[in-house]
Amino acid sequence: MEKEEANYNLIDWWKKVVFKNYANFNGRARRAEYWYFTLGNFILLIPFYALAVIGAINNSIILSLLGSAANGLFAFAILIPSLAVIVRRLHDINKSGWNYFIVLIRSLVPLFCWYGFLLMETGSLTNMEMIQKMQFQQNLTLNKSRLSIEQCI
């Protein structure tokens, strides 16, 4: 016999999102479903974070890696249910689920820009070398076009 949603507790809401609606992007998610799922994830991630921090404080690479790996695996495992419950919550407030992905993509653009600048600064080409290389390539194309014009005359 299954409980009514009015009698659900934290664990019931979390299980509903993860097991019953794993990749269900259709329909609506109540406020309680979304927030209890988020709270459950936060509570489940605390031991993994603690393990990683304790390992870092004690200079234990194995303990730190174990905590970080467990944290990463758990985060990867709940990625699809998290996206699904966010989209269903947006449906509940009469918004399209694509709104979240637009915001997600828009927030990732600065990270890619930062990564590009980081590669430019630490890579084999510095800014000045990159500019000089571009100017050299422009001069080569300009000289080639002049040669081809002179050949036509």
Image (tube, helix red, strand yellow):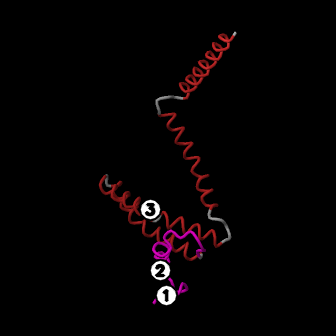
Labelled pair 2, 1 in contact (Cβ < 8 Å): yes
Query: Which kind of residue does numbered mark 2 sit on?
Result: Asp
- Along the horizontal axis of the image, is 68 left or right of 5? left
Q: CB atoms at circles 3 and 1 under 8 Å apart?
A: no
Tell me the distance, in whole angstroms, between the alpha carbons under discs 2 and 1.
Answer: 9 Å
Q: Quadrant of the C terminus?
A: top right
The x, y position of residue 120, in whole percent, is 52, 34
Give the numbered dot on residue 32. none
Q: Position of residue 16 (x, y in %)?
A: 49, 77
Q: Which part of the image, by quadrant, shows the N terminus?
A: bottom left
Give me the residue at 64% from left, 73% from top.
92
Give the secondary structure at mark 2.
helix
Q: Amino acid at mark 1?
A: Lys
Q: Which residues are magenta?
A: 1-29
Q: Which residue is mark 3?
A: 75
Q: Which residue is mark 2?
A: 12
Based on the displayed image, in which of its 4 quarters is residue 88 positioned? bottom right
Q: CA distance from mark 3 to mark 2?
A: 20 Å
Residue 139 colored in magenta in the image: no
